């Protein structure tokens, strides 16, 4: 859960630019830790800059799809749906 600390730091600093860079890096990775994904999404959902994150939250979907535990996958998807602001085709397919 190394990323979680950094994400929380950027959220606290309200640094959306650095958060976005970190998010792109995270979503491009292969490591799938459902607890970490859920914790990051939950932290973002509860912050005041969440609307800035809404248009690109769905870039996490390839990693969410790799979560083996059905309940954890559902929890992550629910958070993505709660945060998103685009109603993108990728979300519609879920």
Image (cartoon, rainbow, N blue to C red):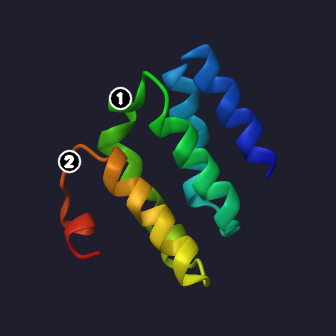
Residue ID for mark 2: 86
Q: Position of residue 84 (x, y in %)?
A: 30, 47
Does residue 48 appear left or right of residue 36 in this picture?
left
Which corner quadrant of the image does residue 8 belong to? top right
Residue 7, relative to residue 49: is it above or below? below
Q: Position of residue 42 (x, y in %)?
A: 54, 45
* Residue sitting at the far top: 13
Q: Which mark is residue 73?
A: none
Does residue 67 appear left or right of residue 86 in this picture?
right
Does residue 18 appear left or right of residue 49 in this picture?
right
Q: Residue at x 66, y 69 (%)?
A: 30
Q: Nearer the viewer, residue 85 or 75?
A: 75
Crowd band around label 1 with a 10 angstrom C-alpha radius: few (<14), some (14–19), many (20+): some
Secondary structure under tag 1 reads helix
How many numbered marks does the figure carry? 2
Mark 2 and mark 1: Cα distance apart in space: 11 Å
Residue ID for mark 1: 52
Q: Is residue 74 visible?
A: yes
């Amino acid at each position: 859960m190394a990323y979680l600390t950094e994400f929380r730091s950027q959220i606290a600093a309200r640094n959306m630019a650095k958060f976005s860079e970190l998010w792109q890096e995270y979503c491009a990775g292969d490591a799938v830790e459902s607890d970490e994904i859920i914790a990051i999404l939950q932290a973002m959902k509860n912050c005041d800059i969440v609307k800035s994150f809404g248009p690109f939250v769905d870039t996490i979907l390839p990693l969410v799809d790799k979560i083996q535990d059905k309940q954890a996958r559902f929890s992550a998807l629910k958070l993505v749906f709660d945060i998103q602001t685009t109603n993108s085709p990728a979300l519609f397919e879920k």
